[in-house]
Image (cartoon, rainbow, N blue to C red):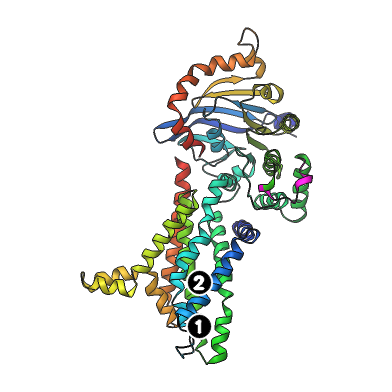
């Protein structure tokens, strides 16, 4: 009954933690600079001559690969390093409330970063007549993708008190989640194994599901996929945190 | 019409056959005791004896390998939320969120304890007064001196006026005046609550405890009032008793311990 109150308390503290340190500002500035650079310079936003945000969203899986673990690596490793984990988990709250609260705070922070890219959407509407439904689907997909990476980072940060290790592990896992469905890799795979196997591997990839959002398709299966990645990773975080104390 | 005396005898903590294993090593080995309201219990023992591990189990941080802990009648494993509500806990090294102010940190802890609005403000104010934190209220925790950092975490443990206080080395890193203050506070709080605190300062035990438990290598090796323990030595000194009970192992520890102890305190 007061589960939500506990989650909200933890969320508030975690979110404030981003903004009382320079992390939030450094992250937001770098995120916006990089999205701008990829979209306009490498993605040839203007030269494409089409009113869409394809050149904007295409880069998100790669951009998030480094930025999301950077935002999530401290979630639990910092608690362990400072010893505040002992304080937090002896409070009258459940492990899940702590895990969900911390996760939601970081996700909200990433959502804020993503929301600050609104000038791109305005630009494309100013110059042309894009399908805004596709753009909204693109944003939803991007947010789900960020959430999945974040849940991975949450899990790796529970593994270690060292933020660098947490970061590297999380980048590796996210890279796998990309590559399993990345076209050059799946093309290469089809030469060696049957297409059925390639499809199964690709089904585990965030790319496959992210791309259908970018085509403007809001398919329940894709939403379920991202929700299951998040759910599974947060559940694993809980198991790790419990096991560390079980000795 | 059950009198005050009845309540006085209320058993708030009961620990039965508590065992904690880290891999093959038994950090706590078959520890049983109970504490009644109005008692101040001192945990004594050499470093790595299992004091912190025992406290971490009572506060619900470590699940016990076997054994049973009840706090105010609530089983710590079966009903941890109800049990944790009754406890205020000062962990070893007094952790705190580095980027928060003392005020923000105390409000956060009060909120997790379910205190809202005015009652939260009053609770924070009371804890700040008890621990003399006025001067640093809006300072961030990472800029505090060790003494203030310690008192901030102590304030956190008192914020919901708990029935049970578990303090892991509450006077560690304090100057003599602060030590004196904290001992006085423990004694005062112990009149109406249960206080369990660990220390390796023997004079502290004599100054503040109504009962002492000496733990060595995960086992209880002595349990009694300071006076009873002192009576065991011909000179009537607690230090002699402590050395006699725990010394034979200390030499042994120096060789066998390092890796395991690092793991446990991690």
Measuring from the top left, give residue B118's x and y in whole percent.
78, 54
Q: How many marks?
A: 2
Q: Secondary structure at mark 2?
A: helix
Residue B135 counted in the magenta span: yes
Residue B98 counted in the magenta span: no
What residue is at 55 percent from the left and 14 percent from the top?
B244
- The mark found on residue A135 in the picture is 1
| Magenta span of residues | B132-142
Measuring from the top left, give residue A190's x and y in whole percent.
23, 73
What residue is at 26 percent from the left and 72 percent from the top?
A188
Chain letter for mark 2: A
Indicate the quadrant where residue A223 lies.
bottom left
The reply to whether residue A1 is visible in this rendering is no
> Badge 2 is on which residue?
A143
Measuring from the top left, give residue A97's x and y in whole percent.
55, 55
Query: Dividing the image into 4 quarters, which one contains the C terminus of chain A?
Result: top left
In this picture, is B148 found above or below B27?
below
Chain letter for mark 1: A
């Amino acid at each position: 009954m007061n589960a939500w109150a506990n989650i909200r308390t933890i969320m508030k503290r975690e979110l404030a933690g981003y903004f009382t340190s320079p992390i939030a500002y450094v992250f937001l500035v770098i995120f916006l600079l990089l999205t701008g650079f990829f979209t306009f310079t490498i993605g040839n936003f203007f030269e494409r001559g089409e009113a869409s945000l394809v050149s904007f969203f295409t880069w998100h899986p790669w951009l998030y690969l480094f930025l999301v673990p950077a935002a999530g690596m401290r979630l639990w490793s910092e608690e362990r390093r400072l010893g505040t984990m002992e304080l937090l988990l002896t409070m009258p709250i459940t492990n899940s409330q702590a895990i969900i609260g911390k996760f939601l705070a970081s996700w909200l922070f990433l959502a804020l970063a993503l929301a600050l890219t609104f000038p791109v959407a305005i630009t494309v509407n100013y110059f042309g007549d894009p399908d805004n439904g596709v753009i909204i689907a693109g944003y939803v997909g991007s947010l789900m993708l960020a959430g999945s990476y974040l849940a991975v980072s949450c899990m790796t940060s529970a593994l270690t008190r060292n933020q660098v290790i947490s970061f590297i592990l999380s980048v590796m896992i996210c890279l796998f989640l990309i590559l399993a469905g990345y076209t050059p890799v799946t093309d290469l795979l089809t030469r060696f194994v049957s297409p059925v196997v390639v499809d199964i591997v690709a089904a585990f990839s965030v790319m496959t599901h992210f791309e259908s959002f970018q085509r403007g398709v809001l398919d329940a299966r894709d939403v379920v996929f991202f929700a299951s990645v998040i759910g599974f990773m947060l559940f694993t975080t809980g198991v790790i945190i419990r096991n560390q104390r079980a000795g | 019409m059950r009198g005050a005396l009845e309540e006085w005898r209320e058993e708030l903590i009961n620990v039965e056959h508590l065992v904690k294993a880290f891999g093959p090593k038994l950090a706590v080995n078959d520890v049983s005791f109970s504490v009644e309201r109005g008692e101040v219990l001192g945990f004594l023992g050499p470093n790595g004896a299992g004091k912190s591990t025992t406290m971490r189990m009572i506060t619900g941080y470590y699940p016990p390998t076997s054994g049973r802990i009840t706090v105010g009648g609530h089983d710590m494993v079966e009903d941890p939320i109800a049990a944790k509500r009754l406890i205020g806990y000062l962990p070893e090294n007094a952790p705190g969120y580095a980027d928060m102010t003392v005020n923000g940190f105390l409000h956060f802890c009060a909120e997790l304890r379910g205190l809202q609005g005015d009652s939260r403000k009053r609770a924070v104010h009371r804890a700040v007064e008890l621990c003399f934190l006025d001067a640093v209220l809006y300072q961030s925790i990472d800029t505090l001196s060790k003494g203030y950092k310690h008192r901030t975490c102590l304030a956190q443990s008192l914020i919901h006026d708990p029935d049970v206080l578990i303090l892991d080395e509450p006077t560690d890193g304090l100057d003599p005046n602060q030590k004196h203050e904290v001992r006085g506070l423990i004694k005062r709080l112990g009149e109406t609550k249960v206080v369990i605190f660990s220390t390796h300062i023997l004079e502290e035990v004599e100054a503040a405890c109504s009962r002492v438990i000496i733990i060595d290598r995960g086992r209880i090796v002595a349990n009694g009032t300071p006076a009873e323990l002192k009576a065991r030595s011909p000179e009537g000194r607690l230090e002699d008793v402590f050395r006699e009970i725990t010394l034979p192992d200390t030499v042994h520890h120096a060789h066998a311990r390092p890796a395991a102890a690092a793991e446990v305190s991690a």
